[in-house]
Amino acid sequence: MSVSIFLNNATVQIVTGKKAKKGVFERAIKVNAPEGSIINGIIMESDRFAAFLNEVWTANNLPRKDVILVVNSNKIPGRTIEMPLMNPKKSVEYMKRELSDMMREGEEMILAYNSLSSDSSKKMKKMYVELASRDQLKDYIDIFAAAGITLSSIQSAEGSLIGLLEQATAKQYKTFVMQITDQNIVSNVLWVNGVFNYFNSVRLFNEPGTEGYYDDCARSLSNLKQFMVANKIEARIERVVIAGTERNDVSFYSEMVANYGIEAPVEIMNSGLGTNPQQQFEAQKAIFALGGLFDCGKQENFLTNYKTKDKKQSVNPELKKNIIIIASVFAVMMIGFVTALFLKIQRQKKYDELKEYNENPAVVSQAMLFDTFSVKRDKLAAQSNSIDNMLNTIETYPILNDEIIKILQETAKGYATIEIGNFNADSGVVNVAAKAKDVEKINEYIKRLEEKDIFNSVKYSGYTMNSDGTWTINVNCTFAEGVGRGEK
């Protein structure tokens, strides 16, 4: 039995089953991690999280070997590339060059990839390639090892999902969208003409289960459709497949999707998840963890190339023969009572010296002082990591700066005069009052706002006629994540 665990934020997904090209699902477990211990797939408090893992494994009697870790983290960037057909070594070199702009200075980056498609006539192939730092992978290995768990594979959420969909939904439909909800994170996958095309994850501001939450989910699909238009993808969406959801949400969700101009039917994922309907339903609620059971080959596993560095070179047969001869002669020369007795005396003498040294009060005091400073150092390092991750989270909040104000003003030019009101950075909502002589001008102004990619949504509720014959409308615009902060 294999175990696959998915880390993102507060909720940890665990599935058991058999890892194979077509993975076999047995059961799913969902548990809440200690508060603040995981942020964007990064473990913040290693000792606390290791203890948590040990409790979960013990309580559920889970195997501690052959464990697959699936991580959704912005620290693992990826990109789809098209490259010529070549041998594996040259392919890796080519992929590293293509992702050179994603390399982080001072860190050794480990490569993992999924093969997407190939065109033998053009001698080209498509690959989805990702990078993770060696230090980040080592942290995961060490933390799980502290809980007595051995990781056999570390994969990204994107990579594991590609493997699952190739053996499941992609067998039914050529062009489809998959949307996965996980608390306040929604992930979208676009499959076009039988090949993976695009993946993104966005944070939602409304509470899960509310009308606003599902409206946000549907709106993110609308943004995906705009992406298809911008990239001149003309294939018709055959299905919207959803996962991480409940049965009674489908009809309500379907209506919202239709309101955003997507006519494809909506269904809960069940293909490739076994024949038992209840088991299918439980599997789709832990879809990212389930993806770890679908084997796409060793190159989707970051540990494949992580271990390459530590692999010893094979010994030349002639050299090996010489080593055996020398070792045999040395062993014969060492045989004898006098030699053995001499070695024993020497070792005992060395042992006594080391024992005396270790029991020296001055040495013991220095060791205790070193341990004290080591604890303080580790605590400061953990606090520094927490601050870095907090700063990364803050960077996702939008800013209403001069540049964004200028865009709002230029959008209204020729249509209406505007007055910018309150701005809430937490929700990303800014209030704008638009005034025009012609109510149609306001409609055109609203349309221009909706076309701007800096907004996730533009909401308004009716018009008010002023005493001077003009019309006024209040507009609430929700900015997209990170708007106004520029390129990082």
Image: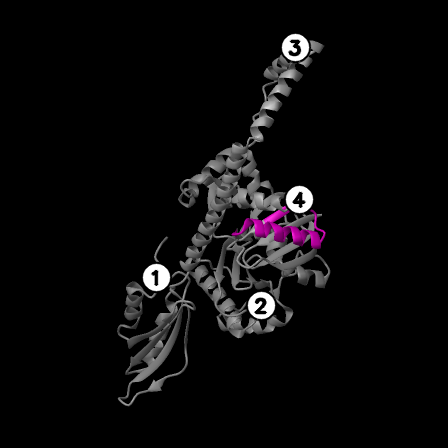
Q: Earlier in the sequence, mark 1 or mark 3?
A: 3
Label 2 Cα neighbours within 10 Å, binned few <14 / some 14-19 / many ≥20: few
Q: Secondary structure at mark 2?
A: loop
User: Along the polypeptide, which appears first: circle 2 or circle 1?
Assistant: 2
Point 58% across, 63% down: residue: 242
Q: Using the image, determine if residue 329 lies above or below residue 475.
A: above
Residue interval drawn in magenta: 43-69
| Measured Cα–Cα span from mark 2 to mark 3 | 78 Å
| Residues at marks 2 and 1 touching, judged by CB atoms closer than 8 Å | no
Distance of mark 2 from mark 1, alpha carbons? 36 Å
Q: Which mark is residue 484?
A: 1
Q: Earlier in the sequence, mark 4 or mark 3?
A: 4
Q: How many angstroms separate mark 4 from mark 1 (CA)?
A: 45 Å
Q: Which amino acid, by three-letter code, is at mark 2?
A: Pro
**Classed neighbour count for the residue bearing mark 4: other residues with Cα under 10 Å, few (<14), some (14–19), many (≥20):** some
Question: Looking at the image, is mark 4 or mark 1 earlier in the sequence?
Answer: 4
SS at circle 4: loop
Identify the residue under disc 4: 66
- Check disc 1 and give the amino acid type: Gly
Report the amino acid beneath label 3.
Val
In the picture provided, is 69 more to the left or to the right than 61? left
| Residue 289 image offset from top left, x and y in percent | 61, 54
At 65% from the left and 16% from the top, the residue drawn is: 345
